[in-house]
Structures are given as C-alpha cells and as structure tokens.
Image: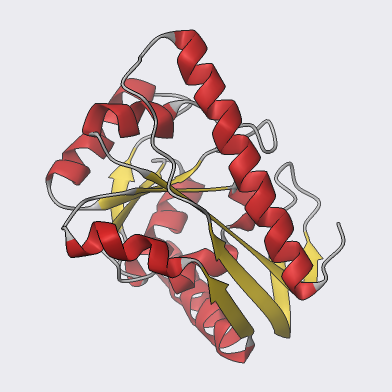
C-alpha cells in the first residue's frame, strides 16, 4: 500500500510538471522507417537524462528494466502507470537474466529502453548490454537525450536533471546506430565508445537548444 501511494504521488507529480514545460523535440521522424515496417528498436539514453523521456515516450510499447529491490519496485510501479512493460532484473547483479528477459520482451513485440550507463555508472560510460542485445536481435539502437533550463541537477553519481516548472526543454533523437554482427570484445568495446560519442553529442545539442551550461 505504501509503495502504491508513493508511486501514484510520483506519477501525478511528473504529469503536473510535464504539463508546464515548453518542449521542443527533433529527430523523432527517424523512427518512422522502423515503425512503418514493424521493426523493433532499442532506445539508449543516459541515466541522468531520463526524467522527461519517461513521460514523453510513455504508452509506446516499450519495456524497461527495473530491479527487484525496494527502490526498483517503486520505480517499476511508476513506470507501469506510464504504460511501460517491466523487465525484472539488474544488468549489474544478474546480466544473463536481464538479457534473457530483454530478448523475451522483444520477441513478444516490445521495444526496449536502456539507461546505458546505469544502474550505478561510471557516468556516461556505455555498458555492453544494449549493444549485445542489438546484435542478438538484429535491431538498431536509437539514441536520445533531453535538456531543460532552468533545471535542478541533483548531487548524485548520474547528475540527474530535473526540470523546473515552466522551463524550456529539448528532446533530441540521434541517428540510428547499427552494431555489427561481430561479437568479439574489441568490437563491442569500440561500438560502446561510438555510442557514447553519439549520446554525448545529442546531449550537448539538447543543452545548446535551451542554453543550458553544465
């Protein structure tokens, strides 16, 4: 009951804040080709730049991973209210289970979203889970990020960005990233680095759109 009340309050708060924001989005049309053909995709974003994306991408047949810890259950309850499907597990504690769960959701018709530097960092360092899943499922990765000004930057490992009411906000979708079918570690590490560069670039682009300076 306690977690249900907290998740409902969080959901209402996010909705209320979102309604006040001045949002500009660019690049969403890059998804049209895949959606017209019924192809699944993987969304990749930084852990600290996901607040606005949760509401913006809601009710779009997306599955997101959430741990079975108390905080994870609260997060899952909030995400469910935004019509996300939940993958139970942790890429840090049970990576094989997390991968299997992601594959099952994609085979069931869902896209998958990854905070690719989560769950605990290092900050803005892509972990291989999304790359490996994209290779396994032969699907593209869609990088996305957001920025807002004015905003609160929390004193957390991910520098979590929380827009202030009525702030100017920008959401940027990057070019689809297509990992190769080479599963060698050197190739995966290189592709993680390439995805990092793309995410950093579109995050900087979003920052410039709202004139946010970190």
**In the rendered image, which quarter is residue 7 located in?**
bottom left
Q: Is residue 63 left or right of residue 163?
A: left
Find residue 199 and report its horizontal and vertical position in percent. 61, 46
> Does 105 appear above or below 172?
above
Residue 90 appearing in the image:
no
**Position of residue 156 in the picture relative to residue 185 (left or right):** right
At horizontal 24% and vertical 50% (from top left) the residue drawn is 40
Residue at screen point 20% across, 45% down:
105
Q: Quadrant of residue 77?
A: bottom left
Nearer to the camera, 132 or 201: 201
In the picture, the quarter occupied by the N terminus is bottom left
Q: Is residue 68 visible?
A: yes
Residue 35 falls in image quadrant? bottom left
Q: Provide residue 37's location: percent of width, then percent of height.
A: 16, 58
At 81% from the left and 51% from the top, the residue drawn is 155
Quarter of the image that includes the C terminus: bottom right
Report x, y in % for residue 23. Answer: 60, 82
């Amino acid at each position: 009951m306690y977690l249900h009340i907290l998740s409902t309050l969080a959901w209402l708060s996010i909705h209320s804040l979102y309604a006040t924001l001045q949002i500009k989005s660019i690049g969403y049309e890059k998804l049209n080709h895949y959606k017209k053909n019924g192809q699944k995709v993987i969304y990749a974003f930084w852990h600290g730049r996901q607040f606005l994306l949760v509401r913006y991408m809601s009710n779009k047949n997306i599955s997101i991973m959430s741990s079975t810890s108390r905080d994870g259950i609260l997060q899952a309850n909030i995400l469910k209210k935004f019509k996300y499907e939940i993958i139970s597990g942790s890429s840090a504690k049970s990576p094989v289970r997390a991968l299997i769960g992601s594959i099952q959701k994609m085979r069931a018709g869902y896209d998958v979203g990854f905070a690719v530097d989560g769950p605990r960092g290092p900050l803005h360092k892509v972990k291989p889970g999304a790359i490996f899943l994209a290779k396994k499922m032969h699907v593209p990765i869609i990088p996305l990020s957001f920025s807002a000004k004015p905003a609160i930057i929390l004193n957390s490992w991910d520098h979590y960005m929380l827009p202030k009411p009525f702030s100017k906000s920008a959401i940027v979708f990057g070019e689809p990233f297509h990992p190769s079918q080479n599963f060698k570690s050197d190739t995966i590490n290189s592709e993680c680095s390439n995805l990092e560069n793309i995410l950093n670039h579109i995050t900087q682009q979003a920052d410039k759109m709202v004139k946010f300076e970190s």
